[in-house]
Image (cartoon, helix red, strand yellow):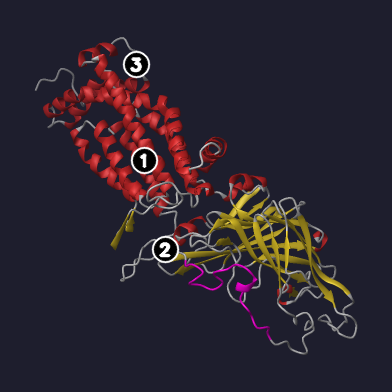
């Protein structure tokens, strides 16, 4: 790497570090016991609601005492019972209390501790999601989470891939004489006071959902418990967690803050969907017909054990009286690209601050190519290596001018060194003479920079794609690399190092070694010697916290770059190009834009008397 490419690599490194250390929530300083600075999400063995995700593992909550004068006492008394819906993709549990979705366990994905991914808050006393709060005629709110609904008597309903089932949770008005009265003392009539209708399908992660509440003036649907974290590093998962709403065809989001408890924002207009996500999973509520109303997002951030950070997001959607027949779809599952696109949820996958450029590259070029390769190659690590070969081949034409320019700089370096020694006491003269040498030998000092800059959007798109792709989650490769979506750990340190922590990535170390070799090949200026040592250290520290799949890509890419450089140098050696030949080649050659500007600058300096012509020393 020389002057022409140094600036571009600085930019790459800056992008990585800015993203890693400024856009991600930071962990607390390490404790005195030397705990790892990379936060770990506790396994269910350490928290409530862990282990088996079936009915037997659900917390038993003692029913509260009901006031005999409570007008809704009949609905507050009952048995908490669960109905299990088994499909090839998930296991869902419906709770009689509130008619709520109590559990949603994905069969094809596992949490970091090995249990199947269970997305719904399972803390003791939390009955479930999709609560309904009625807006009553007396302008009071009635939270139906506290009421016991009637659901089918079966314990388990099993669906095949092409099967579906309709489940109704019904809150019936008591018969006369047993009664429940409303807040005005009026006896309620026999019939359905609230009816929640769920449609489960064996081949989809979404659930169709409808609420009928004829005695209300509208209702509010809410998701109150956030999404359970599934990854080992809670800081990394928190950096990806957010709440979203698509309103007026615009995507809006809310990001929780430690110093802003219960951060809340409301959005009014035509709502396409509202939801929340963690790094790889999402929950979203989508009206099936146009709905103009208000959606509310709420977020809380809290410090967790092991210097971690946990963010929890709630969302709610107001359904006015004129829209009570609206049907909804609840999506609850993985943010796999094809599934997210089917539900118009691709906006939940962030591509960083260059999103307007990066997203089209990622979605229409990189991801399709990535999936195509995996259809032939089972091992995702091998896919990344082949992917690197293809990308390097595609970028080969852009890198040729960079390498040629580097070789020209290597040839003229002795002349530049001699000239610098001659004019070491006159920096202005030295600069002008340097430009003269560049013109004389046809060397463009930034000739290799533009091709590298043109590659940056592609390289950044690769970084964000490999960082966010659920396809790499828990994907085994080889050797010590067992999960391409997280940093690989080759060395565990007994102490914590600043910016590094207690773990060293093997791929980051060998990637840094290849970068060192690459710079040794390209840097010829003695004044830039320190860059050869500083940049590999700088980027190795940054890459130590990156997913191993990303590090595998850059390691392979660097190896290919080194091989290309050796090949181009061998071709130049065969041609036997000398300084005199280089000078002859530059004669009669049409001046480029930069050469023209350099010549104009020198003439202007001479006219101003900064470098008098024919000055005698």
Which of label 3 and label 2 is nearer to you?
2
Magenta-colored span: 42-64
Give me the disc on residue 39.
2
- Residue 350 percent location from the top left of the image: 53, 48
**Image height of 541 relative to 406, above or below:** below
The residue located at (70%, 60%) in the rendering is 294
Which of label 1 and label 3 is nearer to you?
1
Tell me the chief SS of the magenta region: loop
Q: Residues within 10 Å of mark 2 (few under 14, many from 20)?
A: many
Along the line of sight, which residue is nearer the eye, 193 or 184?
A: 193
Q: Whole-Å distance between the Cαs marked 2 and 1?
A: 26 Å
Q: Work out whether mark 1 precedes mark 3 in sequence or the reverse, and give the earlier one.
A: 1
Give me the disc on residue 178.
none
Question: Which residue bears the numbered disc 3?
Answer: 591
**Callout 1: helix, strand or loop?**
helix
- Residue 589 percent location from the top left of the image: 33, 12
Give me the disc on residue 555.
1
**Image height of 362 relative to 565, above or below:** below
Q: Is residue 255 visible?
A: yes
Q: Residue most toward the bottom?
A: 68
């Amino acid at each position: 790497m020389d002057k022409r490419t140094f600036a571009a690599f600085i930019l790459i490194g800056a992008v990585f570090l800015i993203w890693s250390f400024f856009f991600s929530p930071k962990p607390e300083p390490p404790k005195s016991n030397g705990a790892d600075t990379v936060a770990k999400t506790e396994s269910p063995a350490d928290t409530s609601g862990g282990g088996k995700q079936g009915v037997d593992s659900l917390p038993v909550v003692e029913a509260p005492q009901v006031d005999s004068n409570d007008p809704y006492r009949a609905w507050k008394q009952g048995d908490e019972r669960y109905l299990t819906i088994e499909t090839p993709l998930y296991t869902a549990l419906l709770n009689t209390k509130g008619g709520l979705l109590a559990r949603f366990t994905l069969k094809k994905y596992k949490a970091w501790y090995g249990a199947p991914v269970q997305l719904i808050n399972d803390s003791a006393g939390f009955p479930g999601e999709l609560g309904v709060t009625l807006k009553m005629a007396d302008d009071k709110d009635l939270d139906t989470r506290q009421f016991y609904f009637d659901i089918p008597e079966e314990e388990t309903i099993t669906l095949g891939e092409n099967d579906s089932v309709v489940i109704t949770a019904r809150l019936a008005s008591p018969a006369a004489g047993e009664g429940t009265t409303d807040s005005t003392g009026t006896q309620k009539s026999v019939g359905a006071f609230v009816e929640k209708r769920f449609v489960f399908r064996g081949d989809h992660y979404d659930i169709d959902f409808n609420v009928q509440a004829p005695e209300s003036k509208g209702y509010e649907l809410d998701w109150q418990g956030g999404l359970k974290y599934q990854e080992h590093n809670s800081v990394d998962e928190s950096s990806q967690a957010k709440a979203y709403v698509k309103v007026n065809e615009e995507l809006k989001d809310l990001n929780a803050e430690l110093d802003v408890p219960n951060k809340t924002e409301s959005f009014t207009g035509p709502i396409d969907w509202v939801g929340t996500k963690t790094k790889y999973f999402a929950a979203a509520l989508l009206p099936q017909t146009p709905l103009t109303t208000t959606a509310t997002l709420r977020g809380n951030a809290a410090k967790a054990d092991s210097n971690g950070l946990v963010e929890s997001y709630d969302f709610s959607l107001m359904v006015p009286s004129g829209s009570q027949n609206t049907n909804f779809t609840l999506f609850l599952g993985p943010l796999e690209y094809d599934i997210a696109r089917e539900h118009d949820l691709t906006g939940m996958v962030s591509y960083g601050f260059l999103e307007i450029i990066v997203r089209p590259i990622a979605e229409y070029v990189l991801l399709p190519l990535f999936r195509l390769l995996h259809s032939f190659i089972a091992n995702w690590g091998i896919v990344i290596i082949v992917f690197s070969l293809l990308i390097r081949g595609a970028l080969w034409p852009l890198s040729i001018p960079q390498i040629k320019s580097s070789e020209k700089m290597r040839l003229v370096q002795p002349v530049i060194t001699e000239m610098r020694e001659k004019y070491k006491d006159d920096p202005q003269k030295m600069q002008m003479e340097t430009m003269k040498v560049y013109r004389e030998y046809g060397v463009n000092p930034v000739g290799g920079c533009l091709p590298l800059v043109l590659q940056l959007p592609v390289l950044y798109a690769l970084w964000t794609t490999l960082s966010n792709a659920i396809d790499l989650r828990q994907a085994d490769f080889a050797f010590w690399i067992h999960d391409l979506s997280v940093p690989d750990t080759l060395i565990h340190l007994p102490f914590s190092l600043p910016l590094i922590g207690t773990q060293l990535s093997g791929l980051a170390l060998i990637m840094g070694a290849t970068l060192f070799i690459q710079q040794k090949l390209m840097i010829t200026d003695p004044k830039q010697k320190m860059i050869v040592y500083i940049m590999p250290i700088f980027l190795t520290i940054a890459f130590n916290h990156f997913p191993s799949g990303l590090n595998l890509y850059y390691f392979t890419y660097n190896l290919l770059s080194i091989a290309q450089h050796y090949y181009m140098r061998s071709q130049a050696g065969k041609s036997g190009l000398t300084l005199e030949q280089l000078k002859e080649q530059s004669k009669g050659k049409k001046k480029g834009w930069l050469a023209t500007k350099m010549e104009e600058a020198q003439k202007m300096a001479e006219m101003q008397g900064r470098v008098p012509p024919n000055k005698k020393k």
